[in-house]
Each structure stands twice: as structure tokens, then as C-alpha cells.
Image: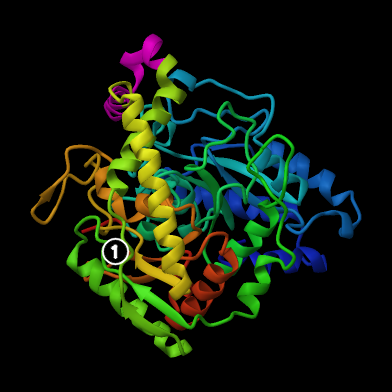
Amino acid sequence: MDELTRKTAREVVALLCRGEVTPVELIEAAAARIAAVEPAVNALPTLCLERARDRARALMARPPEERGPLAGLPLVVKDLDPVAGVRTTLGSPIYADSVPERSDIMVETLEARGGIVIGKSNTPEFGAGANTFNEVFGKTLNPWDTRKTCGGSSGGSAVALASGECWLATGSDLGGSLRTPASFCSVVGFRPSPGRVAEGPNPFPFNSLAVNGPMARTVGDAALMLDAMVGRHPEDPRSFDPPRQPFVAAVDEPTAPRRVAFSPDLGVMPVDPEVAAICARAAARFAETGAAVEQATPDFSGAGEAFQSLRAAGFVASFGALYETDRDRLKPEIVWNIEAGLALSATDIARAERLRGALFHRIAGFFRDHDLLLCPAAAVPPFDVEQRYVEAIGETRFDNYIDWLGVTYAVTLTSCPAISVPCGFTAEGLPVGLQIVGPPRGEAAVLSAAALFEARSGIAARLPIDPRAGS
């Protein structure tokens, strides 16, 4: 059982396709690992193993060619996304007992393509914040040092992967919720282009800031999962057709970039010096692939104002009704974000849209001269789990729970695909992730570059790990 949980998702799918292991055996292997490590990390507070076993048996009754590309591989879904018949809390006491009748489109797609959901991963309340804790299930702890946060908001998914509880996991990303926990847990988190992964149905189907995407222990596994997630769906107007070539092809036959830019901070905020140095050394390794590596930063001016305004307006749209009826049951950060949105004028929102539009055109121009943009995936290493968010970096202090995420939310505004790939460790042994950003809809280029780097770093071989108590 332990041998199975240590294999990559692609290795396990190959075993499934050859008939050397069954989906039920994989569920039992995952269940045993979850039982062993879950008390130390609290990543998967809700399991649905009987539902998974039923679906596995039904899948096994089909001919092998009809079992889909995932072929019966167990996976985990973030607790923001509904899974039919499974408790889905959104990390909120308001929805602590909610059991949806229908799954999210993304979940339906994964299950139709051979994925089997075994549990829900912990998340901050409504996914707000980059430290995974809530009033329903408590804190999720970083397996590299259980005194530390795993990041967020896809923290439970990142921890489940790093500690070997699953082979693949879903995540979502508005301000960095795929990339930050991936960086903090030394796994891969990929934010695809808006519309690449169909989702919903939801009341805001045209939202282009928040997306769903894959999390995995290796770049190849992330590509496998992305291939199983993508495609057009009639209930998601942003969605579009899958690429002609599967994304795993970009990993198996990677193309080296010609010219890449590295920025230590995107010019938007300070970055911890040790993190910046680790990422700079990682970026320099792209020269080994034949790429020209230079330090250059696109003009991200106005990104902070634009993101905070658009995020706040979105919080009013999404949670304004709850603010009216259940304000006392919302965590303070959500209340602050809603009230910031209520204070906006139409002029403020229009200015934010103009700033975002101008940023996009500058980024498009930047990618005419560069194949990729590299930068840290998080401005700091994992911090004390008892600290709600980063309040200061160096001499710069933050008066809210969002501003310290500038190196990821600035990229969100561009709609460019971005991945966090493990690139090193601090002197304290804490993970650091490199963010690789590609041109609009350039997922294949991002995956290709990430695979080339991963092969040179060797870090993926360290996973999964047994949770470690800090000292």
C-alpha cells in the first residue's frame, strides 16, 4: 500500500491501464495513508470512501477503453467545490451541514474521465486568505514543519499531496490560492487561463479573476490532470475547446524557451531576501536549457489598486447578502473585504477596469520579446500557523490580509497561465516555489519549461513526506 502512495499519478494510471492494480485497491491504499498521517496535518476533514468504492466498482464494470484517461485514479476536491452527496462546507459555519445534490462542472468532468473523488480538502472560509484555517474544521498544518501554515486557500489539497494522501487534487485561484500553497508545501500548483477549465454553474459565469486548476506532486501529473479537466461546456460561457495536442505532450517532449525574464519582486512589493535568492538561482538554471536569462520586470503599476478594487466588488456580489443576514458569522477579513467593496464608487470600479486593461496590453507587449516571466511564487517562506496573515516584510507593513500576495495577484490580473514549481528550501528547511508565467493561453509553454526545470532540480523525488514536527 505504501509503495502505491509513493508513485506518481502517471505511474499509477499506467498500472490501472495494464490491469496491475484496481481503483478499489488504490482507494484502500489512500485510505490507509490518510489514517496514518491525517491526525498530524488535518488536510482532508471530509472523506467519501464508500461513495468512491461504489464508483470504482461501477467503473471497473466498463471495458478498459471506456474508463477515461484517469482510469479510476482517486483524487481530492477542494471544499469550495460541490461534490454531489458529499458534505461541502466552503469552510464556513453558515454551510457547515450543506450537502449538494449536484457536483461542480469541473468535478463532473473529472469523474466522467475516470477520476474518483475520495474526499474534500480543507480551505479558509470561502477561500479567503492564504492561511488554511476555519471555524468548521480548524487549522491545516504544513507537513514540512507542522508549526507552519501550508498557505491557502488550496492548502488542504497541497498538504494532502505532499504527505501522500492522494495523487491529484483540485485547487482554485483568485489571488494566488493555487500557487501560494504549492510554494509552501513543495508541490505543483497550476493556474490556467480563464475558461480553460469549465466550472459552475455559478451566479457569476463571466468572472475572469477566479479559476480552478490542478495540483500535483510533479509537473507531468499536473499536465495529466489538466488534460482531464479541460474543454468546452455549455453552462460555462468562458470555456473553450481543448488544445489539439494534449498537455502531457509538452512535458514528455519539452521545448526549451529562448529568452526568459526573471524579476525578484515584479516591482510590486518586497520579497524575503532568502526567497528572492533561491528563486534567482533557480531562474539562472534555465541557461542550462540554452535560454537567454535576463533580469527584467514588466510594468505592473496600478496592479494593487486594480486587484483590490475588483476583488472587493466581487466580494460584495458574492457575499453581500450574507453580510446582511449573517455578518456576525463571517470572519473579520471577509467583513473587511465586503465593506471595502461597499465603499467603492462606480468611478473606482471603472478605474480598476482601465488599469487592468492597460496592464494586459503591457504584458502582451512584454511577451513579444520574452517567452516566459519567472519570479517567486510567494514573497515569504511558510510562517507560523497561528499568524492569520503576513503583516510585514522587512520595513513594509500591510494593513490587510491581501497585500502581501502581490507577486501572485498581479499575475492574476493578466489572465496569463502561471505555475508554481518547487525550486529549493530555506536554511530552516522550508519550501520555496518558482512562479513561471507564460503568454496568454500559453499553458503548453509553461508546462514545458516547468518540466525542464523539475528534471534538473530533482526536488520532486523528495515527495511524499511524513509530517514533521518542528523543533
The amino acid beneath tag 1 is: Leu
Residue 82 in the image: x percent, y percent? 60, 32
Figure check: 5 above or below 256: above
Q: Which residue is mark 1?
A: 430
Prevailing secondary structure of the magenta residues: helix
Q: Residue furthest right?
A: 63
Task: Give the residue displayed 33% in from the left and 42% down from the top.
Answer: 306
**Local secondary structure at mark 1:** loop
Residue 230 in the image: x percent, y percent? 68, 52
Residue 260 in the image: x percent, y percent? 41, 77
Magenta includes 339?
A: yes
Answer yes or no: is residue 2 visible: no
Q: Which residues are magenta?
A: 322-340
Residue 348 in the image: x percent, y percent? 31, 31
Answer yes or no: is residue 410 visible: yes
Figure check: 72 above or below 329: below
Task: Give the residue displayed 75% in from the left and 51% down from the top.
Answer: 114
Q: Nearer the viewer, residue 242 or 61?
A: 242
Q: Which quadrant of the view contains residue 389?
A: top left
Q: Label 1 crowding class (10 Å Cα cut-off): few <14, some 14-19, many 20+? A: some
Q: Which quadrant of the view contains residue 338?
A: top left
